[in-house]
Image: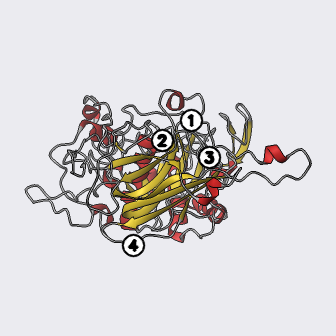
Amino acid sequence: MRALMVTSVGVTCAAALTLPLAAPASSAPVLSSASARPPSLTTEPRTDTSGTSGTTDTSGTTAPDGAEPRAAKSAAEPAGSTQSMPLAPLAVPSNRVAGAPTVHGLPQRDARPFSLVGVVWDDAEAELHGTVQVRTRATGTTRWSDWQDVETHNADHAADLGSAEREGRTVRGATASLWVGDSDGVEVRVRPESPATPESPGSQDRAATPVPLPEGMRLELVDPGEDPAPEPARGAPANRAAVPAVFADTPPTAALPEVLTAEIAAASAVNAEVAELGATVIPALTQAETVESVNLAPGAKPYIGPRPKIVTRKGWGADEKLRERNFGYTKSVKAAFVHHSATGNNYTCKQAPSVLRSIYRYHVKSSGWRDFGYNFAVDKCGNIYEGRAGGVTKAVLGAHTLGFNTNTMGIAVLGSYGSTNPPAAAVTAVSKLTAWKLGLFGANPKGKVTLVSGGSNKYRKGVKVKMNVISGHRDGFATECPGARLYKKLGTARTSSAKLQGR
């Protein structure tokens, strides 16, 4: 079917695209924390993110001795920072047993406040065969959490092999990230897979060899910064304590801010046909309004769902200076891959913007990607968020499904759904989003599509694969994502999405 083209119905923003774009801020080392109890911080050697000692902060601000570093912040963008701590062998009893795998990690230690954790390592092609567990301490308390598992996947969510994003940047191996909430203490242990039990004579030596862990492992502690303030009416003072306008019962009506940075303006201008410059929300349209907003071939039936409300990158507080300046595009959107973020379910919907900013920073600063990996995100309450920058109506090239990022889009449902049922609101949001976005490109949510693999652990490069137009991540890559419980709901999502398109 011929793709539907979106008509420009918003404010013209061509001028914003001509603004000069600043390169992403460089990292700067800061003093580390290793005291037994907060708030006193002791000094350790400084290092960069590839070092083997101390703690690195990638916010771009170095703190004076004895002070907690604070990321520089403009009025338009929230602060945020990343602490990077090298992992080393732990002095645990199992490490002293001959032939036992060496456990790496960090003993309990203080840190500046953070809300999301993950482990990265130097070689993006290396796999972490083992388990990663963390414990964290709630900020300002002595209360430590139980041990929590961190999903150890790394290669399944990534830019395609041979792509500019994969080859032109310092991409690292990484676990999934885990949302732990506001914390100021951490402990981590990484236990490699135990050698297999020998089953035949002569296998003793092979069985006694521990599975090696990747080199250069570092714990990443991400602080998402503050939520963006609601935009006040002109002349009215800002109220930092207020709930962000995008979560109010009605769309924000405040006037645009006086000044937008070049990066924010560029990220907003690519949505000119659907929202005003600097908008925090792209408003929903009815079915009739959606059909009216697209150009149809004479006599063509408008198989397209009503446009859902979408929180923009500005709405969830994306720091546009983090990402690569230029936007990447592919030719079409033939299919949608559904994921879960694997960051856990211990977040509230008001915290979803903080979760997104944390994942974004982890993808760019820790994993080395050019931007947020997914094209869209959905929270447990069914709110839909713009993901990778480039325009919600456009075919933006993501880094969500290794081998199948071309001509597809990635949708991440925030949470972990291996053993937990996804909320009905989240599944409904996936249906609404796919009915609209796939409809823009003439794709049938209940149909099949043939995609060419760019190379993955399931399909070698160049292989043609027939898939559902709405597929799960595991359909293109050998992974548990999007979790067994969410994967079972994709049939419902396909049916609902097709109905919304009028099929």
Quadrant where the image shows the C terminus: bottom right
Kind of residue sitting beneath label 1: Asp
Q: Nearer the viewer, mark 2 or mark 1?
A: 1
**Residue 146 placed where, x, y %?**
50, 70
Report the Cα–Cα distance between label 2 and label 1: 11 Å
> What separation in Å lies between label 3 and label 2 (alpha carbons)?
14 Å
Q: Nearer the viewer, mark 4 or mark 2?
A: 4
Q: Quadrant of residue 260?
A: top left
| Residue bearing mark 1 | 123
Question: Cα distance, mark 4 to mark 1?
Answer: 35 Å
Distance between mark 4 and mark 3 Cα atoms: 30 Å
Query: Residue, x 59% and y 70% (percent of image)?
Result: 420
**Residue tagged 3:** 128
Cβ–Cβ under 8 Å for marks 4 and 1: no
Residue that label 2 marks:
367
The image position of residue 26, as x and y in percent, is 32, 34
